[in-house]
Image: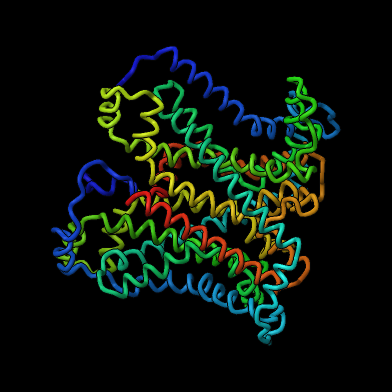
Amino acid sequence: MALPHATTTPPGAREPTAQPPPGAAGRTRRKVGVHAPWWFVVPAIAVYVFIVVVPSANGALFSFTDWNGLRPDWSLVGLDNYAAVFADRTARDALANTLILAAAATVTQNVVGLLLALGVNSMVKSRYLLRVIFFAPVVLTPLVAGYVWSFLLSPNGAVNDALRAVGLDSLAHDWLGDPDTALYAIVAEIVWQFAGYSMVIYLAGLQAIPREVLEAATIDGAGAWSKFRRVVLPLLNGAVVINVMLCLIGGLKQFDQVMAMTGGGPGTATETISTAIYKSAFSLGDFPFSIALAVVMTVVIAVLAAVQFRLTQRKTS
Amino acid sequence: MHARYTWRTLTREATLILLALLFLVPLAGLLNVSLKPQDSQTGTLAFAWPPTLDNYAQAWDQARLGAALANSFAITTVSVVLIIAFAAMAAYPLARVTRGWSRHTFSFVIGGLLVPGQLALLPLYATMRDLGLLGSLWSVILINVGQQIPFSVFLYTMFLRELPLDYEEAALLDGCGPVRSFVTVVFPLLRPVTGTVVILNTVGIWNEFFTPLLYLGGSDNTTAPVAIYGFVSQYVSQWPLIFAGLVISVIPILVVYFALQKHIIKGFAGGLKG
């Protein structure tokens, strides 16, 4: 059976072929009596409102109260919870750590992912097998990956063994036990696990670049580097935007690997907003503090998303 | 530009293969250590010989992985089926109806992509507790469905907007009602995006740690990652035993990956490019 064109293409996979202009045939024919019942949205909206909308709105509201989660009664306390959050050293450390971790992971993962994509997009014979290998860690349970790495990074683990084997004994140390390196060790784990994810998105972007464009650049005498800088990279803009957004939001919510590798320690060296929210609520029972911290996290994500959106809008227009 | 296989390509290939081996070291180390006797003092990468399966039998029993894997399986299956049903249904009017309410509803749902789950965490926890759902698989299933609705609805709607109306119109002319035409005509046409939705959600939900830790931790209904978390803190630094448990817990998802890798890689890229 011949399927219509769109069904063989993943959504958003931009074909170089021309799309029909908006408002042409499609618009007028849309009125020809295809009835999509409005109540089809009800189940999805009901669960979404129950699980996401109402509790999120309540979270924002309760951050201005002394609600402790147990009693139904509460009273307004204004900005007290926020004052407590910003006065708390652990919370401030968590905020700083989260921003550093998200930024470091986003930059490194995108550079590595792009290099891998360029590598496996070339004519190397093993490219299909390589894609499978580089992507494999993506499907691994993050918690499990965290445990494996905490073992590799332990004082007598493989990383230190390898350093000693090549004579770099001075670098060998307890990566996760040292407050100066623990956060970056976690970043390294995240990059190992998710570089393959960035790779496939960049790969999809690379494969959407029409071959004629590259050939034209070659004919014009462009070398490999200038071809990459002036032709490939601008055309990958869409993939960059999505990759940066995904890495950034993923990094800002980081929880699993930290719990597996350090539990937030040593001290507060790897505490993230997510682990701090979890601990203040479920270990310390401080619901008001925890909920205010969650609002701070939401604001941070929203601001960074808006900034990124503005920057990329300017770039594309 | 089908260049010949040059020295440059060879160098590139060698570099990539070396890098791939480096990528595989953690996975190989995981498997290797799990096969060592528990009192083994050899280094991380010293080959486990003779290999022993004792750790696997012991981890299976002590981490109660059988029950945990069954729960993971149940949660993942039911969640993914509900996500597909609800998201595909919702996307149909959202993509086809051009009036105002549809646009507003779409924005309302997509807005959920920007709200981190942590904001809803405590009120939702209190609600689930009041409903008596703590420790029940249904709490985790409901949360998975609610949290995944925005992204899945987004994928389905974008896909449907590109899908021509011809088939639905033909069905309508043949006397098909809207519901029947959705079930028999539209939903089968959504197969490619359904594949993407299944892949993304299966991997995400199977590997999910935070929600089941919170809602199922301490109950008899744990999932594989939560069972592993408890197991590791109990047998801390008995690495061979722990690693056997880790291997068992990731076998299902890795089997799925290697069996479907071609579609999975495509689905991830396609689903996220939109």
Residue lying at 47% horizontally and 36% vertically, measured from the top left: A114
- What percent of the width, then of the height, locates residue A199? 47, 38
Q: Is residue B255 above or below residue B6?
A: below
The answer to whether residue B65 is seen in the rendering is yes
- What percent of the width, then of the height, locates residue A27? 17, 63
- What percent of the width, then of the height, locates residue A196? 51, 38
The answer to whether residue B50 is seen in the rendering is no
Q: Is residue B7 above or below residue B219?
A: above
Q: Is residue A258 left or right of residue A195?
A: right
Residue lying at 69% horizontally and 50% vertically, measured from the top left: A258
Residue lying at 60% horizontally and 69% vertically, measured from the top left: A295
Q: Is residue B125 left or right of residue A304?
A: right
Is B212 in front, or is A133?
A133
Q: Is residue B253 left or right of residue B165?
A: right
Is B165 in front, or is B115?
B115
In what quadrant of the picture does the N terminus of chain B appear? top left
